[in-house]
Amino acid sequence: MYPEFDISQHGEDDWTVVEIRGEADVFTVPRIRQHVLEHIEQGRLRFIVDLRRVTFMDSTGLGVLIGILKRIRTRDGELRLVINTREIHKIFQLTGLHRVFPIYPSLDDAVTPP
């Protein structure tokens, strides 16, 4: 049986906030990709991916975020991440992706950075 996973979105100012809950791995990446790409095709180009409730992320989870970032940037969009757990933040630090993605500790900070 697969671990619990859910993905949803809501608007926050002019941002589309995509909240991922559970594991971001080889089994869930197709749903993450499809979910975000559908919104990009609808013309939404400012995304905040909320990873505060992600319990595990593997290389395919990182890969889908990189792919989404590339797709958004080709359309002059923007992608921000919300991470507040040491385990997930460490993955971004170890891979150097903390230099690629703007990472914020809370949704409020991501919507209105200092």
Image: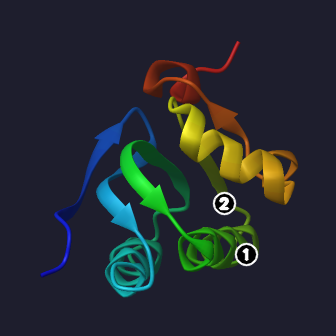
> In the image, residue 79 lies at what x, y percent?
62, 53
One can see residue 23 in this view: yes
Secondary structure of the residue carrying tag 1 is helix
> In the image, residue 2 lies at what x, y percent?
18, 78
Q: In this rendered view, identify the residue nearer to me: 5 or 101.
A: 5
Q: Which mark is residue 110?
A: none
Residue drawn at (34%, 78%) of the image: 28
Query: Looking at the picture, which amino acid does disc 2 mark?
Result: Gly
- Above or below, 24 against 104 in this view is below
Q: Mark 1 points at which residue?
A: 70
Q: Name the residue under label 2.
A: 77
- What is the distance, in whole Å, between disc 1 and disc 2 at their CAs? 9 Å
> In the image, residue 103 lies at what x, y percent?
67, 37
- Left or right of 25: which side holds 111? right
Query: Looking at the picture, which amino acid does disc 1 mark?
Result: Lys
Callout 1 touching callout 2 (CB < 8 Å): no
